[in-house]
Amino acid sequence: MKILPHRLEKAQEEKALRSLTKEIADEEDLLRQGGGKSGRERQARLGRMTVRERLTHLLDPHAAFFELGIWAGYKMYPEWGDLPAAGVVTGIGVVKNRSCMVIANDATVKAGAMFPQSVKKVLRAQRIAFECRLPVIYLVDSSGVFLPLQDEIFPDEDDFGRIFRNNAIFSASGIPQIAAIMGNCIAGGGYLPVLCDKLLMTEGSGLYLAGPALVKAAIGQNVDEEELGGAKMHFEISGTVDFLEKDDQACLERLRTLIDMLPMDESLPSKSSPTETERSIEDVYEIVSADGKKPYDTTELLSCIVDKGSCIEYKSGYGKTLITAYAKIQGIDVGLLANQRKQTKTGKGEIEIGGVIYSDAADKAARFIMDCNQTKLPLIFLQDVMGFMVGKEAEQSGIIRNGAKIVNAVSNSIVPKITIIVGNSFGAGHYALCGKAYDPNFILAWPCAKYAVMGAEQASDTLFMIQEKAAERHGKPWDKDEAGRMRDKIKKRYDEQMDIRYGAARGWIDAIIAPHETRESLIRMLHLVKRAPLPQRTFHTGVFQV
């Protein structure tokens, strides 16, 4: 049977996205191995579990663990070697039928030392826990700050000390925190467990502000580790430790018992019959291409994600390059903003490019965001945006003014916000559709997502033209071959930086998810954000350009 060309192309595009998704999943499996065989052997010699083994014992069996920031630090510290998952595991798991944020050092990676991205990863996990009012479990096994990079870790408002400040704020806000020291806890890091509500410690672990060598150097005192900061000393003499446990297994069992004393969790997804979608979630691989270049009808993408028959498009005939709609996801009411990636036509018959935000679309989106805040609907942003429209007509239409309306509305929103980057995320379009700087409760991305001020082609061409004009202005000879090589070099660098793994390493997103996991991830996140009480203030935008 002869395969039609368009069907063959569609099959190849689907295969490409599935292949990229598998590549990401395989790399994440490697990251989960932490420091590898030598690190695991070291933990075994010390009679300790690895961080992943600890999670297996701590979390309820068969309950999904929503891991955050697994790409943190990826390829960021080549001079210091690999840093899988930034040496710390963070994620939302279920313990005794209660959703909890878990923050656990991986001592197989640089002895659990904290790098700059390790700190930022912990701070992001704390922020999510605070916003969702999640109990926090800390599994501490760390040698402290990575000293060669101390200047990037120590003093600033988003550095190491902020973790302890957050511990105190959590406590004052009534959010439970339980820490278990299951190895080393050295120097300033000791404040984290002591600022928690309850503190457990295993035999053979150490908690001290300065180790024996530093004590000897500082005050000339000779003291061994157990006498200085051992578990028995802290349990019987300093009174710092609440529960002394024999080993990791006993400690994790005690943790589960303590979590079981917390109030029941009403926010876990119910086990009721799942609702249907119009199309299978697997169809997303047919709709969206891996390279982000293929136009598609975004309403088809939505039909794979939202409950069947629930989608009501708002102002469907106006500002068509942005879809605004009310819908349900597993019965939960939401407001959706998504870029329409196919070419559209205005009521006046003008052609508009898919994925580009025009003045009318910006105006509509701002109005929709305001309405969702008025009715307290969570907002979900599905980004595949090339940016705002440029040119004389766009500027005269007030594109900056109308774009500012979205930014204002998003910035002042009081309802939960969840962002998923399904394709491109370029320029101010990223900002307007609730990018990382606009406080989404969660921000996730597909494997094909791309982050940048603009596309690689546009960036390299723009810089090429700037250099050409500069040479003309100064009367210098223009070497087109050299300029061409420079353009290729810039494009290559942009392509590398647009890869979503680059952004994930720097904490610009919380996780990379497989496209077919989008609906389930949204259901999980919507239940989590329901835990957070809405701010006391009402929605208000201040001065609004009209």
Image (cartoon, rainbow, N blue to C red):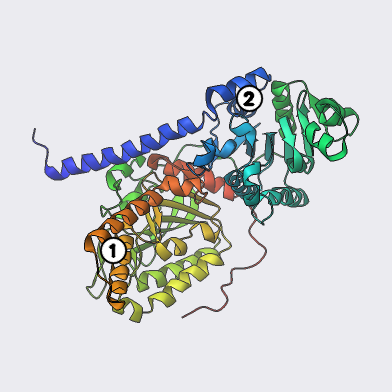
Do callouts 2 and 1 mark residues in contact (Cβ within 8 Å)? no
Q: Identify the secondary structure beneath mark 2.
A: helix
> In this orientation, does residue 370 appear?
no
Of all residues, the one furthest to the right in this rendering is 237
Residue under label 2: 57
Of all residues, the one furthest to the front in this rendering is 476
Residue type at mark 1 is Asp
Q: Nearer the viewer, residue 258 or 116?
A: 116
Relative to 452, does residue 135 appear above or below in the rendering?
Answer: above
Q: Identify the secondary structure beneath mark 1.
A: helix
> In this orientation, does residue 526 appear?
yes
Residue type at mark 2 is His
Graded by Cα atoms within 10 Å as few (under 14), some (14 to 19) or many (20 or more), the crowding at tag 1 reads: some
The residue located at (71%, 50%) in the rendering is 161
Q: Which of 71 and 78 is in front in this view?
A: 78
Residue 243, how many percent across, how many down?
81, 29
Graded by Cα atoms within 10 Å as few (under 14), some (14 to 19) or many (20 or more), the crowding at tag 2 reads: some
What's the CA distance linking mark 2 and mark 1?
54 Å
| Viewer-nearest of discs 2 and 1 | 1
The residue located at (12%, 37%) in the rendering is 3
- The earlier-in-sequence mark between 2 and 1 is 2
Q: Nearer the viewer, residue 59 or 182?
A: 182
Residue 308, how many percent across, how many down?
38, 47
The quadrant in which the N terminus is found is top left
Relative to 507, does residue 435 appear above or below in the rendering?
Answer: below
Residue 288, how many percent across, how many down?
30, 48
Any mark on residue 461, and which? 1
Residue 327, how many percent across, how many down?
43, 54
The residue located at (84%, 31%) in the rendering is 228
